[in-house]
Amino acid sequence: MNTSIVIADDHPLMLRGLTDFLTSKGFNIIGSATDGNAAYNLIVKLKPEIAILDIRMPHKTGLEIAEECQKNGLPTKVILITFDKEEELFDKAKSFNVYGYILKEFAVEEIETCIEHVVNGNPYFSEEIAEHLNCNLINSHLEELDKLTKSELKIVKLISDNKTSHDIANELSISIRTVDKHRSNIVAKLGLDNKPTSLSIWANLNKSNL
């Protein structure tokens, strides 16, 4: 479980709380920072597997750091913690390939589950955020669901259960290549963008409709 993590938050209590909590759970906290510049420098220098960032920090916001990481091809997966539920921020986070987005008031309850998902390459978003997002994100592709074949629907359902392509291939006794082909057909039919996390996020948000 020795996942390397950098944490940044400009609230010392939040920073200490999360650091102590994750350390006690056996995670390897290799650095912490109280502002965005320091956080980004730590990510560049230490290349942690995961960076847990407050969205609003001096010098650089968590979103700006995520954008820089994406632009510069850094392997670190970003988890944002925030009090914000605005759809615009959420959309930005998705476009910068952010893997996790959790609300501060649930951070300690959700962070472990979030890290577990992210380590396995699956995005994780607080349910509360999904609920607060305008329904248009959820409903905009629903009519497209009718275009999916039975097999594709089955795969979307498994993706919504956070199953990887490998899990799905095993479960349906098909090759990973076939799963990946289905995935790209589904992405095309739903009109999603090609980011690796888009389909998982969509499947998670639409779970109740699948």
Image (cartoon, rainbow, N blue to C red):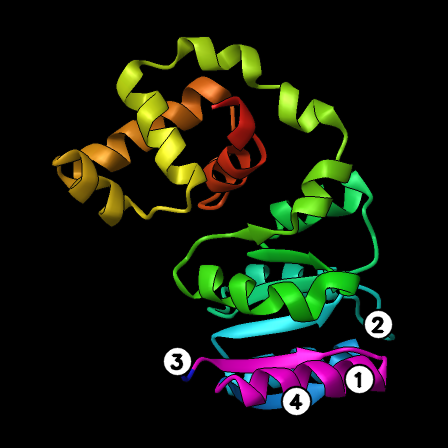
Q: Write the residue at 32% across / 30% down.
A: 155
Judging from the image, what secondary structure is the residue with disc 2 in? loop
- Is residue 71 at least partly visible in the picture? yes
Q: CA distance from mark 1 to mark 2?
A: 8 Å
Please tell me how crowded label 3 is: few (under 14), some (14-19), or many (20+) other residues with Cα within 10 Å. few
Q: Write the residue at 72% across / 46% down.
A: 128
Where does the magenta region start and end?
A: 3-26
Which residue reaches farthest front?
109
* Residue assigned mark 2: 57
Q: CA distance from mark 3 to mark 4?
A: 16 Å
Judging from the image, what secondary structure is the residue with disc 1 in? loop
| Contact between labelled residues 2 and 1, with CB atoms less than 8 Å apart | yes
Q: CA distance from mark 1 to mark 3?
A: 25 Å
Task: Please say if 72 is above or below 140.
Answer: below
- In primary-sequence order, the first of circles 1 and 3 is 3
Say which of 89 and 122 sits in front: 122
- In primary-sequence order, the first of circles 3 and 4 is 3
Query: Looking at the rendered structure, which numbered label has been put on residue 20?
Result: 4
The reply to whether the magenta stretch includes residue 161 is: no
Type of amino acid at the residue the image marks with label 1 = Thr
For the N terminus, the image quarter is bottom left
Place of residue 54 in the rendered image (x, y in percent of width and height, measured from the top left) = 76, 69
Q: CA distance from mark 1 to mark 4?
A: 15 Å
- In primary-sequence order, the first of circles 1 and 4 is 4
* Residue assigned mark 3: 1
The reply to whether the magenta stretch includes residue 22 is: yes
Task: Tell me the mark number nearer the camera, choosing from 4 and 2.
Answer: 4
Say which of 176 and 47 sits in front: 176
